[in-house]
Every structure is written in C-alpha cells, then in structure tokens.
Image (spheres, rainbow, N blue to C red):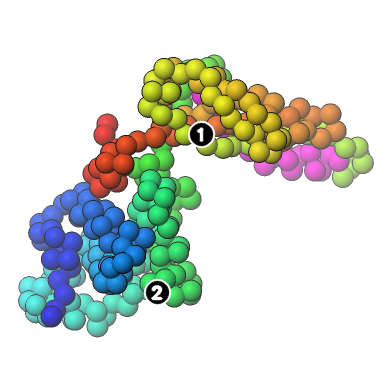
Amino acid sequence: MEKDYYQILGVGQNAETKEIKEAYRQMAFKYHPDRNTENPDAAEKMKAVNEAYAVLSDPSKKREYDSLRQQFGNSAYNQFRKTYSDQDIFSGSDINQIFEEMAKAFGLRGFDDIFKEFYGQGYRTTFEFKSTGLFSGDFIFSGNFGKKENKSAEQPPKISYLNKLSRFVIEKVTGVELPENGADLTDMILLSPQQAQEGGPYAYFHKKKSKKLVVKIPPGIREGQHIRLSGMGEDGKGGGNPGDLYLKVQIRKPFIQKVQDFIFGPHK
C-alpha cells in the first residue's frame, strides 16, 4: 500500500505546525522502542512517524509533498522519495530535540541510541539535524529567581575567556603564578511539588567533595531556577577563592502530567 504522511500522523492537510508537532509527540511516545519491547512492529511504525514529521514540519518539503499529492494522488509518496533521500528528509529537522525531551521526561533512550539502531552507526555523518546547543524544549526551563541580589537562586555566571587569556600572558611574561579562583560547578536536584512550594532543608550529597550538605530551599522556587552554594565549587589555585556550586531545580511531576506536557507542551 502507498504511504501517506498525513495518514501516518493522523492529521489533515491543513494542520497547523503546532498540531503536527503534537501529533508527532503522541506517536513518538506511543511507538518508542523502549515502550514496545514485545511489539516487533513498533520500530517500523516509529521510523514511519519520524519520516512523516520531518517532511510535514518543514514548510518547503511540505509544499513539495502537497504539490505531488495534487498531481499523483496516492502515488505521491513514491514520487517524493525518488528525489528525497533519508539525508534530505531529516536535514534541518528538530526530531533530535523532541527525542531528548522525551528521554529526560520519561527515562527512555535518547535520540542518538535510537537513530543508531534505526539508521546505522554512520547516521551522524550524513544527517544534519537542527542544533541549538542546549535543549530548550518542554522539560528544561531557565529563569532568574526574583532580583539579581537574591543569591539563593541565580544563574551560573558566564566564563570570561578574555580574563583567562590575560592571565596566561601575564604569567608567561613575568614567570609569576597568579591566584586563580576555582571553577563553578553545576548539578541538578529533584524536588517534589510540596518541597518546591513549602521550601525547607534538603539533603544533598556533593560527589566532588564527598560531603553531605543540607541545602535551604526557598519557598515557592520554580522549575529551572538555580540555588547557589558559595565556595562549594572547584578549589582555587595559588591562593584563589573556591568556585560556587549551582544546583538546578527540577520538580517531579506525576506520570500522566509528564505525558500531557510532552504532547501538548507545559501548562502555562
């Protein structure tokens, strides 16, 4: 039987971008191989929805596919694949980001493992997915806690490469080792909704220093905010101050809420 990308995703030809993404999220979660270990057909269905989403979520590919559907009807898929390889279809897609969101939310295997399984070890050398540096999807948030002077939940500072270069030049010229502050560290803590709302003490084990710490959680802290622990980063050199430790907050969600957030986006 001829394939039809719209039928595979269960959307109409006039579906908006948001509807297409929601349909894909739902299908990707349904057919993820880790959730279908006893269903041998799930992998092929997963590959089909990946391809359908990569085409329909790209405006130019979607226009070309729509044009072929008008000309060739049920044969549009075969006509489309005559000119589009897997590399062409997935180029520029954000499927990698959606897979990572799903992996972070549900503990499933991520994008790299699944695509190696589907398309072979060399897929990264030919597939060019959308890159953002950091995943900024539905489950990873960012934001400041109140005003800047509130040190209990601030963002880690950016590294100054100019300062590092200046230090290197001075040490080379003078032969004197300058004091260097220790690097900041980051980690994640998982709170229950009640802990986030009420605040209070939180037991945290600092792996780098092999220490047990009691962290004070501010009441009403939100997902993605950072708690700063002064002096708990890397040790300084030459008399420099130790860095800080920034704990990024994630709030545990009921499983059904995770599914709803993954498909429809987080509740605002």
The question of residue 156 being in magenta is answered with yes
The question of residue 11 being in magenta is answered with no
Label 2 belongs to which residue? 119
Label 1 belongs to which residue? 189
- Residue 173: horizontal and vertical position, in percent? 89, 43
Q: Nearer the viewer, residue 233 or 161?
A: 233
Determine the image quadrant of residue 250. top left
Q: Amino acid at mark 2?
A: Tyr
First in sequence: mark 1 vs mark 2:
2
Which of discs 1 and 2 lies nearer the camera? The answer is 1
Magenta residues, start to end = 153-171
254 sits to left or right of 70: right
Element type at mark 1: strand
Q: Residue at x 28, y 38 (%)?
A: 257
Q: Residue at x 64, y 34 (%)?
A: 206
Element type at mark 2: helix
Determine the image quadrant of residue 118. bottom left
At label 2, counting other C-alpha atoms closer than 10 Å, the crowd grade (few under 14, some 14-19, many 20 or more) is few
In this view, the residue farthest toward the right is 175
Determine the image quadrant of residue 27. bottom left
Q: Main secondary structure of the magenta part?
A: helix
Residue 158 visible (yes or no): no
Q: Nearer the viewer, residue 42 or 152?
A: 42
- Residue 239: horizontal and vertical position, in percent? 84, 29
At label 1, counting other C-alpha atoms closer than 10 Å, the crowd grade (few under 14, some 14-19, many 20 or more) is some
Locate the N terminus by quadrant: bottom left
